[in-house]
Image (tube, rainbow, N blue to C red):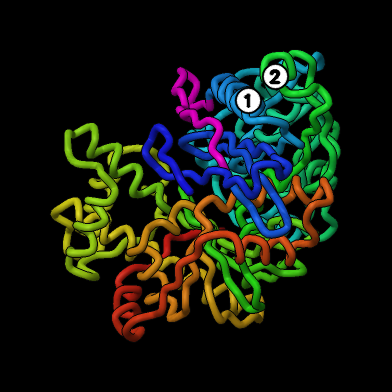
Amino acid sequence: MSRPHRGGTPVTTTPPSSAFAPAFAAVDLGATSGRVILGRVGPDNLDLTEAHRFPNTPVRLPDGLRWDVLALFQGILDGLREAARSGGVASVGVDTWAVDYGLLDADGALLGQPFHYRDDRTDGVAEHVWAAVGPAELYGITGLQHLPFNTVFQLASTAGTVQTDVARTLLLMPDLLIHWLTGSVGAEETNASTTGLFDARTGTWSQEILGRLSLDPGLLPPLRAPGDPAGTLLPHVAGYTGLDARTPVTTVASHDTASAVVAVPATKPDFAYISCGTWSLAGLELDAPVLSEESRAANFTNERGVDGTIRYLRNIMGMWLLEECRRTWDRDGLPTHIPTLLADAAQARPFASVVDPDAPEFLAPGDMPARIRDFCARTGQGVPDSQGAVVRCILESLALAHRRTLRQAAELAGRDITHVHLVGGGSRNDLLCQLTADATGLPVVAGPTEATALGNILVQARAAGLVGDLAAMRRLIARTQHLRHYTPRGGSAVWDAAAARIAPAPRNS
C-alpha cells in the first residue's frame, strides 16, 4: 500500500499484518532533505512509513558555506514526535552524509555551524597535508580515496583558528546529532573511516597521522560499531517528542552509504553495487582493504561496512548534476518536472555528447547546464541544445562512469562481477538503470529506493534480536521489497567510442 506525502512521492504504509510489529525510527539526513522513517520489522515483513520530511538548506555566511544543523535537529525532533504518535518506538538510529563535523568546546557547546563539504576553504590544502604525510603513505594507512573535502583536509584548512584552538571534541555529523539526543560522545566507525584519520588496517584512529599533523588525539572520541548502544533520550528530548525517556538510541552504520549497502538485496556472490543519489557510490564488498599503489592511482576508497566488511568503491558525482541543472532551470523559469525531463531525454539523440562527471568544475553549486555545455565544447563534442539533450548527456555520462569504476574495481580487487545492484533514489530512474545495464554489459537489479533507511532500521532490529546476520538482512530485503530487473541491450562498441572521447580528470598526486 502507498500514499503520497507532501511532495507527492509514494511512501509505504504499514499493512494490518505488521501493525503490531516492533517499530524503529530511522533518522536519515541527505544533502537536500532529512526525514524520519518508521520501520516495522517481522520475520516476513519490512514496512516503512514516512513520519516527517524537512528540507536541508545550507546557508552561505561571510566565512563560507555552512549546514544549518540547528534547523536539522529541530526537524529530527519534530519527526520523532510524529513517530511517537504512531505508537511505541523500540529505538532510534541516525545516519547522514560523511566527512563533515562539528567542534565542541570544553563545556560541550558547539563552536559554530558545521562547514559544508562543498565550501571552497579546502582548495589547495591537500598539498600542505601531503608535506607532512605523503599521498602514497596516507593512502597506505587510510586506504581513502582522495577528495579535496575529506575531513583531514577540512581540519588542516582551519589550523590555527580560534575555533580550532579552543575545540576539545570533534563529532562527525551523525555523532553530533546523537550527542544532542542522548548526551553521549562517540564516533561510529563507518563514518570515521571516511575522515582520512582512520587506519584501514587496524580499524582504529591512526595515531601516526594524528602525530604527523600535530592533531590532539583527544579531539577524537572513542569508536563505536553498528549495533552498539549509544544511550537513551535526554529528558528534554523525551518531553518534546513524547517518546519514553528509556528509548534507546542505537548506533547504526551512520554513513548513509554504509546503511544503503546493508540493504543491497544480494542473495548470490560476485555482485557489485551502486548506491545512487546525490553521489553514485560504485564498488564491491570485500573482506579486507586493497591498499596497493594501483588502487591509489585509480583513486578507490576502502571504507568500513557492517560486520568488518570493506566498502571498496569510488565516489562518482551522481544525480547532483541533474539536481543542479534543475535549480538553474527553475531560476530561469524552465520546466523541471522529472518525468518530463526523463521522457525528453529518452527521445534525445544517443551519445551526442558525454562528460566526465568527476571533473572539478562540476563540484561546486552553480550553473550546471552552462558547465556541461562548456565541457562538451572544450572536448570537441556537440553542445547539448535542449533540456532533454542535457539530461541524456548526464545519464549516459553516469552510466559510463559506473562502467569504468566497476571494471576497475573488479580488476584491482581480483574479483568477478556477474550482476549489479543499483539502490537508492537513482533506482527509480528507468533510463539510468537501463543505460547502466547497457554500459556495463551486466544485468542490473534496481531497488530498494529507500535503501539507506532500510539499512538503518535493520541494524536496529538486529540489535533488538529480531533479525540475523548481514546475509539474513539481505534475504529479508530481497523477499519483501519491490525490485526491477534490467537486461543489457546491444554491444559495447558504442560505449567504447563514447568513453574514448573523454579522459578522467586527474584525481591524485
Q: Which residue is mark 1?
A: 85
Q: Position of residue 216 (x, y in %)?
A: 82, 32
Per the model, the C-alpha gap separating discs 1 and 2 is 8 Å
Q: Is residue 127 visible?
A: no
Decide if residue 347 is on the left or right side of residue 180.
left
Is the residue 12 above or below the residue 217 in the image? below
In the picture, measured across the screen, residue 56 lies left or right of residue 326, that is: right
Q: Is residue 319 above or below residue 404?
A: above
Looking at marks 1 and 2 on the same chain, the residue that comes earlier in the sequence is marked by 1
Image coords of residue 201 (percent x, y): 81, 60
User: Mark number for residue 33?
Assistant: none
Amino acid carrying label 1: it is Arg
Q: Choose top left, top right, bottom left or bottom right for residue 57.
A: top left
Front-most of residues 208 and 368: 368
Q: Nearer the viewer, residue 252 or 152?
A: 252
- Give the quarter of the image for residue 427: bottom left
- For image coordinates 59% across by 34% down, the residue present is 36
User: Label 2 sits on what residue type?
Assistant: Gly
Labels 1 and 2 touching (C-beta < 8 A): yes
Residue at 37% x, 58% y is 429
Nearer to us: label 1 or label 2: 1
Asked whether the viewer can see residue 51, the reply is: yes
The secondary element bearing badge 2 is classed as: loop
Q: Which dot marks residue 242?
A: 2
Mark 2 burial class by Cα count in 10 Å: few <14, some 14-19, many 20+: some
Residue 295: give x, y in percent of width and height: 63, 69
Residue stretch in magenta: 48-67
